[in-house]
Image (cartoon, helix red, strand yellow):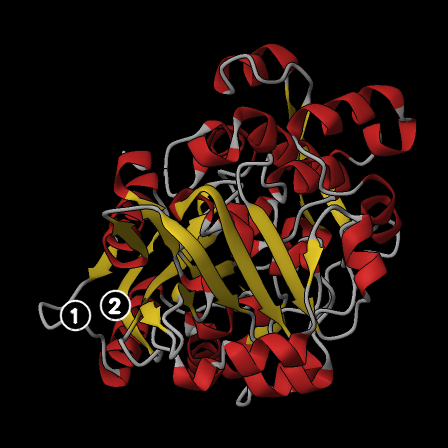
Amino acid sequence: MESICIQPDNGEITDEQLRNALYELFDGLGPRRRVVAVPPDITRLHSRAGQITETVFRYYGASLTDVLPALGTHLPLTPEERAHMYPGVPAHLFRTHNWRTDVHTLGRVPPDVVRELTGGVAEFAWPAEINRLLAMGGHDLILSIGQVVPHEVIGMANYNKNIFVGTGGYECISKSHYVSAVYGIERVLGRADNPVRRLMNHAEREYAAALPIVYVMTVVGTRSDGSTFLRGLFIGDTPDCFDQAAQCALETNVTLLERPQRKIVAYLDPEEFKSTWLGNKAIYRTRLALDEGGELIVLAPGVQQFGEDPEIDPLIRRFGYCGREATLQAVAQHEELRASLGTAAHLIQGSSEERFTVTYCPGKLTRAEIEAVGYRYADLNTMMRRYDPKHLVPGENTLPDGEQIYYVPNPALGLWAERSRFS
């Protein structure tokens, strides 16, 4: 198919432009009998996926037979989250992906190919796993919907990650995350070309070419007042289309700073972030901006647990965010962590490697729980009074007593880096 790529000169795509572009796509594809939409979960609330999925439903009607949110390892959408993010889409269309039980293996990338694609970081077989509904549901159109934004595991989120991770299985997700963590989070962040992306591109070419997947990818910008707008829309089924979206996200979502920051305060929306598994985006997306010995303060009113998965949460509590070398040693010594490489990857990525400190201010977790995993703790109410999001502006702020901070109101929407550390 011919790609549709929209980046208005004035910087913003209107609702009408979005609707017209989608209708142009659907008209060009021709009649479809069984359509499945694969949009994100609540952690991509600002992606415009809700609006796009509603447009899909209004166009296809009864031919839209399934909506399968790309949960990956995340918790299922609650009824309230679904109604909030997808208000115009009937609840009976939604399916829940289970990364442990719902997957089909399309093929396995051999160890020698994995070694070549990852630059020697890994040498194990990697399974290209997707949800059974996509593999065997008889759909004649799979609409993968999501946001391209800097990402800690795959450099730039979305494209085939939405399929292989969003609807993937335990082994597929764990091993891909581990490859990225061992390769190095700071070498991956914001880079569209990296070992995990090469691995998934290979898997799509070799094992998923027959699937009728069309990618609908958005790039979302943030205004000075913290509100968001649709900056780019990229629709297609080729790597070139994704590359254009990634370039737009690079220009839109990466903030380069002229000097490293001594103190960054990040706020996590309680509707989106209920665990450090997700909330650690505050660490991932700001680590390149923090000075040696600096401090990251995470205001996390919704955080009430560490892992999203009941088997992963205890592993995080046991092994903690203790750095790359200690985690790799724990993997070598403990079978339960070796069997959960995705958890090991998360522990590596969530560590400051003692380069800066992380102070978590959670809504529900206790001081003892936070300090046990290797972070500093501060009382949420006390810190919210001092660093009140209602009185801060994105970027540099000087408090009444002269303290200087850098404020990030939603770390999931971008990447912040000191210029010399991002090239």
Q: Which mark is residue 231?
A: 2
Q: Is residue 110 above or below residue 338?
A: above
Q: Is residue 206 above or below residue 94?
A: above
Closer-to-camera residue (62/89):
89
Closer-to-camera residue (256/277):
256
Q: What is the three-letter code of the residue carrying label 2? A: Arg
Q: Which residue ends up furthest to the front in the rendered image?
A: 401
Q: Quadrant of residue 328?
A: top right
Q: Do the residues bearing badges 1 and 2 touch, measured as CB atoms within 8 Å?
A: yes
Q: Earlier in the sequence, mark 1 or mark 2?
A: 1
Q: Quadrant of residue 15?
A: bottom left
Assign the C terminus to one quadrant of the image: top left
- Relative placement, left or right, of 96 versus 422 is right
SS for dot 2: strand
Residue 394 % position (x, y): 34, 71
Identify the residue shown where x is 70% and y is 72%.
Answer: 379
Q: Which residue ends up furthest to the left in the rendered image?
A: 9
Residue 379 visible in this rendered orientation of the protein = yes
Q: Which mark is residue 271?
A: none
Closer-to-camera residue (287/397):
397
Residue 66 % position (x, y): 63, 71
Identify the residue shown where x is 73% and y is 60%.
Answer: 97
Residue 315 % position (x, y): 85, 44
Per the image, the residue denoted by label 1 is 11
Identify the residue shown where x is 52% and y is 48%.
Answer: 284
Q: What is the three-letter code of the residue carrying label 1? A: Gly
SS for dot 1: loop
The crowd level at tag 1 (other Cα within 10 Å; few <14, some 14-19, many 20+) is few
